Image (spheres, rainbow, N blue to C red):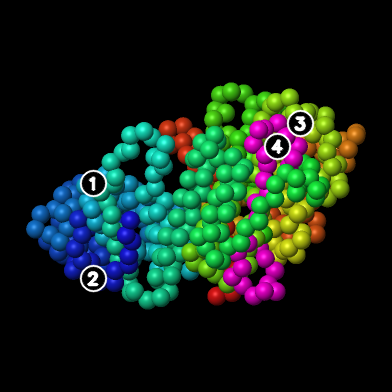
């Protein structure tokens, strides 16, 4: 797909399909006014007749004759006062969806001059272009590599986006949006790959490939012997029931100064989760291939860094294992010693994510990190609490938590903070070890983070529970690519550019 910015007047730009925005009330954007003049007042007439509407995210395709465009998609953008970044994005998604349904090979998207409410960080033209770029990549995505009969390739192969100018700032914003969308799609590719293909060593090979293709990435892979020598017994315990051995995958991006502390991302990489001996119900278990969503998002963020190459140091660590129930699997009641030296009584083998993460969170202390952010499809309780709209956020540092929340708002990839009070810690008490790997049924998301907090006391840390946001179920089943946009926004806001 060819994407570009165009600073030419809409009226003098040819394309198979023109996309314009129509507000529900208020003044039209300049691009819509220009198009209406070229079309002899057609848009105004269609609006007056009720054939098109400004209702947000409505979309109507109109055939044209004797015009620079063969057809026009009119997308409603709602009322000016209600046009938040979230609602603007809904209109963009509707516009891209409508264009995909046409036979157009080229499109001109004239939605950049539609105003958005809110602070400069979300309402500027640069912010709108960033969102347009991301949305184009995200919603022109498909995953069909495992179908025996490939669907027809989409006819659309060129999209121009109208912008006020072709200046560097706007180009950079648009390209960052495109890169973010591609990072999301890489995350989705990894997540959608079937678990008979995507296992820990396969993930390690993806890291090696990323390093081979990008000089700015260095990769180190720790196998089970190396992890055993270090004392990473909880990762090994999770993986010991599987024929696929666990791996600790380290990717380093060094774009900042040599002495700049790195920002560390830690991803849960359970490539398939049966629950182990604490076996999950069979219904919907196929979706447990998405239990490596945290690691997939880490890969996606690193992919974006290779494209935009900001001046920042980032270390990504993926704790990869497969949780299977065979004769060698860990049992409820087993006690293991973590890399930190603390002991854990495994009361439930389906609470395995925190077991692989705790060793990884201890391991990353060696990097003297600026911050550590872990990402994990960790608890079903998070879905009960927040549904599928917001990522759960818990942190031992208010500043870091607030920065991530703000990044989520700017990227329309939102999170909600839950408490990490000491009051919850006694739910993890064990009669036989330093701690248990689960508490009782109450506050499951919080107690899972409380467990991780015991391994993160020496640095600023945030935990993102993406159990409700990493993938979609039902008819739209598939990985979502979240929270790559939040991560990218946060990292870029801290880059020394």
Mark 1 / mark 3, whichever is N-terminal: 1
Mark 1 / mark 4, whichever is N-terminal: 1
Which residue is label 4 attached to? 239
Q: Quadrant of residue 287?
A: top right
Q: CA distance from mark 4 to mark 3?
A: 8 Å
Mark 1 / mark 2, whichever is N-terminal: 2
Task: Please give left or right for residue 89 compared with residue 17 in the image.
Answer: right
Which residue is label 3 attached to? 330
Residue 291 image point, x, y percent: 60, 39
Please tell me whether residue 259 belongs to the stretch shown in magenta. Answer: yes
Task: Name the disc covering residue 9, or none.
Answer: 2
Residue in the image at 69% along x and 58% along y:
372
Task: Name the disc covering residue 188, or none.
Answer: none
Q: Quadrant of residue 241?
A: top right
Q: CA distance from mark 1 to mark 3?
A: 54 Å
Could you say which is closer to the camera, residue 204 or residue 195?
204
Element assignment for label 1:
loop
Residue 355 image point, x, y percent: 74, 41
Which residue is label 1 attached to? 102
Q: CA distance from mark 2 to mark 3?
A: 66 Å
Please tell me whether residue 110 belongs to the stretch shown in magenta. Answer: no
């Amino acid at each position: 797909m060819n994407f570009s910015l165009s600073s030419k007047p809409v009226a003098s730009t040819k394309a198979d399909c023109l996309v314009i925005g129509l507000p529900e009330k208020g003044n039209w954007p300049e691009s819509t006014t220009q198009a209406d003049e070229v079309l002899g007042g057609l848009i105004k007439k269609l609006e007056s007749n009720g054939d098109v509407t400004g209702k947000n995210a409505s979309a109507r395709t109109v055939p044209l004759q004797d015009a620079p465009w063969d057809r026009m998609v009119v997308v409603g953008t709602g009322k000016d006062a209600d046009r938040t970044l979230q609602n603007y994005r809904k209109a963009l998604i509707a516009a891209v969806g409508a264009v995909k349904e046409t036979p157009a090979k080229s499109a001109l998207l004239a939605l950049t001059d539609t105003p958005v409410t809110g602070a400069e960080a979300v309402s500027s033209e640069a912010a709108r272009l960033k969102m347009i770029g991301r949305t184009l990549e995200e919603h022109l995505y498909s995953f069909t590599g495992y179908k025996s009969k490939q669907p027809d390739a989409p006819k659309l192969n060129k999209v121009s986006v109208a912008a006020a100018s072709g200046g560097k700032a706007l180009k950079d914003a648009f390209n960052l949006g495109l890169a973010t969308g591609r990072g999301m799609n890489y995350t989705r590719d990894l997540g959608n790959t079937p678990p008979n293909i995507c296992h820990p060593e396969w993930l390690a090979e993806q890291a090696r490939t990323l390093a081979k293709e990008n000089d700015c990435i260095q990769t180190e892979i720790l196998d089970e012997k190396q992890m055993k020598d270090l004392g990473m017994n909880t990762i090994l315990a999770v993986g010991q029931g599987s024929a696929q051995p666990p791996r600790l995958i380290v990717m380093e991006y060094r774009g900042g100064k040599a002495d700049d502390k790195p920002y560390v991302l830690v991803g849960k990489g359970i490539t398939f989760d049966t629950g182990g001996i604490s076996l999950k119900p069979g219904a919907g278990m196929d979706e447990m291939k998405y239990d490596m969503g945290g690691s997939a998002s880490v890969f996606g963020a690193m992919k974006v860094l290779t494209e935009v190459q900001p001046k920042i140091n980032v270390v990504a660590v993926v704790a990869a294992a497969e949780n299977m129930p065979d004769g060698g699997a860990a049992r409820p009641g087993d006690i293991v010693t973590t890399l930190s030296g603390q002991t854990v009584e495994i009361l439930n083998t389906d609470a395995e994510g925190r077991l692989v993460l705790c060793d990884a969170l201890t391991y990353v202390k060696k990097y003297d990190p600026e911050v550590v952010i872990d990402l994990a499809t960790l608890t079903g309780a998070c879905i009960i609490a927040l549904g599928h709209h917001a990522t759960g956020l818990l942190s031992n540092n208010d500043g870091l938590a607030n920065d991530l929340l703000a990044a989520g708002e700017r990227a329309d990839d939102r999170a909600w903070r839950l408490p990490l009070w000491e009051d919850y810690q006694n739910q993890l008490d064990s009669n036989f070890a330093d701690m248990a790997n689960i508490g009782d049924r109450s506050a499951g998301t919080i107690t899972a983070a409380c467990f991780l907090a015991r391994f993160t006391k020496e640095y600023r840390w945030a935990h993102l529970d993406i159990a409700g946001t990493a993938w979609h179920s039902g008819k739209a089943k598939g990985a979502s690519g979240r929270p790559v946009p939040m991560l990218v926004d946060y990292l870029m806001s801290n880059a020394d550019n």
